[in-house]
Image (cartoon, rainbow, N blue to C red):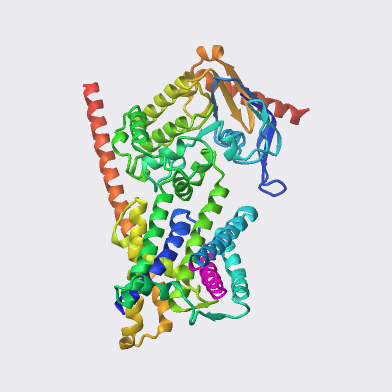
């Protein structure tokens, strides 16, 4: 599905602010994988997503999507395959437009034509789809999206992303800005959709329990590298405490080897 | 006289719909307008003087405006400069081009030549002259409004609206935002030039300085319209733009004819327009602030209630 070879990203190269956000990462994502990504702030999780979806160009390396080299493909073209949901619930929907207008834009990927496709049968379909969110949005088709709460907007974004039938889902802490109840609802919907539409997914989360509970693989990032890669098998016996200990022991090893460098 | 204000306002309203598309729908602060309005007037005038049909002349005018819009959008897209600068560049270049179109003159009259506004009285011969002009203009404006309303209900139109509200969403839906901007800007400036072409025929001349200050006047009309009613329906938004345009022209008429009582001269009207926009902005801002303060209070109250409910639950568990 997705193959990342030796990609790296340097911000502001050649200035005092130069920062290496991603350092030669390799990652292969198989069809149907659901990978959770953890790591502290600034470890490069979001940058990795930005590189995969094409928001930023890579500094080096190669990205292959479905066997095609997409390293230099613009973001909007990669979006045909990749659906992305951001932490900020306002990023996925147009606030100044009604729910139905938002949904009709999301229905098909790609350039739109001069046809009016928003008709009664479409509205009926939208209502059916909105019902599964159980947020009462099916009765508010003509309301502006800006009137919705963060949880409602994020659920709508999720639904719209799924309606456009991507093959892959990039979830960038998409429940972090929501209150616990709404976060739970959005997370439940996410897993439902992933299973129903067999979406290959990558999910960044700060919730260690989520990282362990969901998905079939877990990767941990730190300082622009993948420092831990656990399979479904290894995840089964994992607890939050063990995960934190693993992180600490890896960090300690690093410090230890740094000390070695200094002393020898 | 009163009919004159309406004709003036209606012609102006087509321009304001153009400004609405760039500023409000696309969220693109476009200054091309000041140039493309005069381009429309110049192209229509020269076409009529050279004997093309009136419809062809208006089509050519809109086409020229659309090209100006495409140039601004392309400068913005390719060179990655802010829309404001791209618009200023096109506007400045257009000033020279407009004089070229007018054959090296800054002003070309349309005297003793048939224009739309000499033809309207013949078409509507049952009406008096001013009313015939008004009805003719109204029909053109209603056709333009209907076409724009339909356009913004198509998938393409909705996508252009979504682009102005959230560019990331358009990218995520696999659409090239640059292409949408080009289409939107072409439409916007096409309408602005059409309005210029009509005005030249109504007032009987084209002038290279015709477009000066059009953007601000357009914004003033949009803001006046926004005070009238609130809606997210395109048909009502274009309707309120037309009302706003007429009210703006009426205000300016009052300023021009009765302003001398308070020592106002016609040259003060630009100042008045600017002040009008500033007042509109202040009113809109206080309104926003009031409604968001209200929303904040409500949110705090909701939070408090939720916490109390949780505390109560926790209390029960402890007991």
Left or right: B163 as drawn, with respect to A67? left
Q: Is residue B170 visible?
A: yes
Residue B253: which quarter of the image? bottom left
Q: Between B83 and A217, which is closer to the camera in this rendering?
A: B83
Q: What span is colored magenta in the figure?
A: B30-54
**Vertical placement of B184 versus A61: above or below?**
below
Left or right: B291 as drawn, with respect to A84? left
Residue A151 appears at what percent x and percent y?
37, 35
Q: Between A239 and B223, which is closer to the camera in this rendering?
A: B223
**Vertical placement of B86 versus A44: above or below?**
below
Q: Between A10 and B81, which is closer to the camera in this rendering?
A: B81
Any magenta on residue B36? Answer: yes
Residue A131: which quarter of the image? top left
Q: Residue at x 44, y 24 (%)?
A: A193
Residue B149 appears at what percent x and percent y?
39, 53
Residue A22: which quarter of the image? top right
Which quadrant is home to the C terminus of chain A? top right
Magenta segment main secondary structure = helix
Which quadrant is home to the N terminus of chain A? top right
Number of on-image labels:
0
Residue B5 appears at what percent x and percent y?
34, 75
Any magenta on residue B42? Answer: yes
**Vertical placement of A154 versus B66: above or below?**
above
**Vertical placement of A195 versus A186: above or below?**
above
Residue A239 appears at what percent x and percent y?
49, 17
Q: Between B97 and B305, which is closer to the camera in this rendering?
A: B97
Left or right: B184 as drawn, with respect to B76? left
Q: Is residue B281 visible?
A: no
């Amino acid at each position: 599905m997705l193959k990342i070879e030796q990609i790296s990203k340097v911000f502001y190269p050649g200035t005092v602010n130069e920062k290496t956000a991603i350092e030669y990462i390799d990652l292969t994502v198989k069809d149907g994988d659901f990978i959770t990504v953890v790591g502290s702030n600034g470890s490069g999780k979001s940058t990795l997503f930005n590189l995969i979806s094409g928001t930023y160009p890579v500094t080096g390396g190669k990205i292959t999507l479905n066997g095609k080299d997409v390293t230099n493909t613009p973001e909007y073209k990669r979006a045909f395959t990749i659906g992305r949901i951001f932490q900020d619930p306002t990023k996925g929907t147009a606030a100044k437009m009604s729910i139905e207008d938002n949904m009709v834009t999301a229905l098909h990927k790609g350039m739109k034509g001069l046809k009016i496709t928003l008709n009664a049968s479409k509205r009926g379909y939208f209502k059916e789809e909105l019902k599964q969110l159980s947020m009462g949005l099916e009765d508010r088709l003509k309301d502006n999206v800006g009137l919705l709460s963060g949880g409602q907007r994020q659920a709508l974004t999720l639904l719209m992303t799924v309606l456009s039938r991507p093959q892959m889902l990039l979830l960038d802490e998409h429940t972090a800005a929501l209150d616990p109840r709404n976060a739970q609802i959005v997370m439940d919907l996410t897993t439902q959709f992933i299973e129903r539409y067999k979406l290959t997914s990558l999910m960044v989360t700060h919730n260690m329990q989520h990282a362990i509970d969901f998905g079939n693989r877990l990767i941990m990032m730190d300082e622009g590298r993948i420092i831990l890669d656990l399979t479904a098998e290894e995840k089964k016996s994992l607890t939050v405490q063990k995960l934190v200990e693993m992180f600490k022991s890896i960090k300690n090893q690093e410090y230890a080897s740094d000390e070695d460098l200094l002393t020898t | 006289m009163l009919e004159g204000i309406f004709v003036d306002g209606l012609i102006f309203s087509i321009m304001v719909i153009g400004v609405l598309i760039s500023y409000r729908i696309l969220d693109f602060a476009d200054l091309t307008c000041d140039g493309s309005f005069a381009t429309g007037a110049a192209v229509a005038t020269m076409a009529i003087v050279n004997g093309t049909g009136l419809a062809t002349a208006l089509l050519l005018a809109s086409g020229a405006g659309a090209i100006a819009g495409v140039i601004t959008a392309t400068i913005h897209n390719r060179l990655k400069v802010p829309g404001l600068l791209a618009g200023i560049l096109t506007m400045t270049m257009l000033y020279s081009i407009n004089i070229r179109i007018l054959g090296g003159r800054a002003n070309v009259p349309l005297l003793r030549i048939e224009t739309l506004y000499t033809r309207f009285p013949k078409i509507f011969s049952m009406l008096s002259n001013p009313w015939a002009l008004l009805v003719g203009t109204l029909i053109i404006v209603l056709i333009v409004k209907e076409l724009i309303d339909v356009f913004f209900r198509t998938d393409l139109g909705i996508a252009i609206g979504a682009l102005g509200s959230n560019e990331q969403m358009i990218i995520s839906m696999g659409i090239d935002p640059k292409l949408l901007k080009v289409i939107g800007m072409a439409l916007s400036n096409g309408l602005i030039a059409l309005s210029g072409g009509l005005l030249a025929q109504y007032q009987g001349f084209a002038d290279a300085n015709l477009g000066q200050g059009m953007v601000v006047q357009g914004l003033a009309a949009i803001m006046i319209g926004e005070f009238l009613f609130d809606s997210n329906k395109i048909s009502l938004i274009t309707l309120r733009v037309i009302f706003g345009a007429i009210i703006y022209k009426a205000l300016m008429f009052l300023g021009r004819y009765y302003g001398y009582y308070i020592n106002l001269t016609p040259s003060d009207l630009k100042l008045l327009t600017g002040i009008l926009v500033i007042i509109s902005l202040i009113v809109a801002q206080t309104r926003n602030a009031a409604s968001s303060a209200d929303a904040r209070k409500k949110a705090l109250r909701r939070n408090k209630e939720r916490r109390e409910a949780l505390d109560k639950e926790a209390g029960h568990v402890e007991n």
